[in-house]
């Protein structure tokens, strides 16, 4: 997949879940896919935009990656393999098909690694699992995303998973609308583009 540099903004977070937003760091999967994560630094920029990770942890990861570029590249390969398996599995589920065993295996492996790296902490009168740089190292973003992905897939009604209908998009999202008829990742971009194209076709046909 061709990589390109992208400035992540809140407009890129339309999945309704961190794991889906990770899948959406590649775009135009329906035409000529483009990967917005050319390197580990880009992954960290996306993680910062997501709002899920502590700035201090991301700064530590940035330092770790600078000190061990080989390890950072290997961690990037791991999270992208996870992202692509998650994407393929989601596309299958959206289409009412069984995901491929190889993709489910990869999700399970990522989940198991995340579970092994988790640290138990008492918080607000409960015991919760947390992921730290100390426990997860350069896989911190992967571990949190893998946990979120499995939690989502166990809880979400699969009939509410969507792939955007927009051209040059292919983003995945959870349709939380009351009607359950959301077709586009974002009305302001894909929705309006689709409407404009229909309008142009009608004009051309008239
Ligand atoms: Zn879209």
Image (cartoon, rainbow, N blue to C red):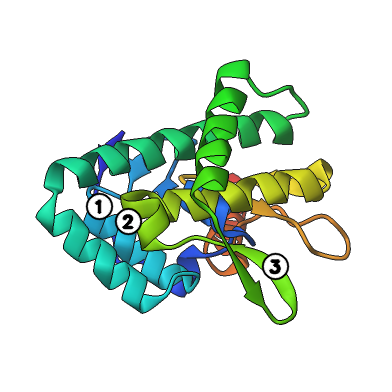
Q: Are marks 2 and 1 in contact (CB under 8 Å)?
A: yes
Q: Callout 1: 10 Å neighbours few (<14), some, many (20+)?
A: many
Task: Tell me which corner region of the image, top left, top right, bottom left or bottom right, holds residue 103.
Answer: top right
Q: Residue at x 60, y 58 (%)?
A: 15
Q: Which mark is residue 127?
A: 3
Instruction: Indicate left or right for 104 with 59 as reference.
Output: right
Q: Is residue 66 visible?
A: yes
Q: In which quadrant of the rendered image does the N terminus lie? A: top left
Q: Callout 2: 10 Å neighbours few (<14), some, many (20+)?
A: many
Q: Is residue 32 above or below residue 62?
A: above
Earlier-in-chain disc, 3 versus 2: 2
Q: Nearer the viewer, residue 113 or 6?
A: 113
Q: Which mark is residue 48?
A: none
Residue 93 lies, in percent from the top left, at 72, 32
Residue 86 lies, in percent from the top left, at 55, 37
Residue holding disc 1: 40
Total labels drawn: 3
CB at mark 1 closer than 8 A to ligand 1?
no
Earlier-in-chain disc, 1 versus 3: 1
Secondary structure under tag 3 reads strand
Residue holding disc 2: 43
Residue 141 lies, in percent from the top left, at 42, 55
Q: Nearer the viewer, residue 101 or 37?
A: 101
Q: Nearer the viewer, residue 31 or 8?
A: 8
Name the residue furthest bottom: 124
Q: Residue at x 24, y 47 (%)?
A: 38
């Amino acid at each position: 997949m061709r990589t390109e540099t992208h400035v992540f903004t809140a407009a890129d977070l339309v999945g309704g879940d961190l794991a889906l937003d990770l899948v959406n760091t590649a775009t135009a999967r329906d035409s000529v896919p483009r990967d917005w994560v050319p390197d580990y630094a880009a992954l960290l920029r996306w993680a910062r935009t997501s709002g899920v990770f502590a700035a201090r942890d991301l700064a530590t990861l940035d330092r770790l990656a600078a000190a061990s570029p080989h390890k950072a590249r290997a961690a990037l390969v791991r999270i992208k393999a996870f992202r692509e398996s998650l994407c393929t599995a989601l596309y299958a589920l959206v289409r009412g098909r069984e995901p491929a065993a190889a993709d489910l295996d990869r999700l399970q492996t990522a989940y198991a690694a995340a579970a092994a790296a988790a640290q138990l902490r008492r918080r607000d009168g409960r015991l919760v699992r947390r992921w730290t740089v100390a426990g997860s190292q350069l896989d911190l973003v992967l571990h949190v995303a893998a946990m979120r992905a499995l939690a989502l897939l166990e809880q979400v009604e699969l009939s509410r998973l969507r792939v955007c209908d927009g051209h040059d998009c292919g983003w995945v999202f959870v349709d939380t609308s009351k009607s359950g008829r959301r077709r586009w990742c974002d009305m302001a971009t894909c929705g309006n583009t689709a409407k404009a194209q229909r309008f142009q076709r009608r004009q051309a046909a008239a």
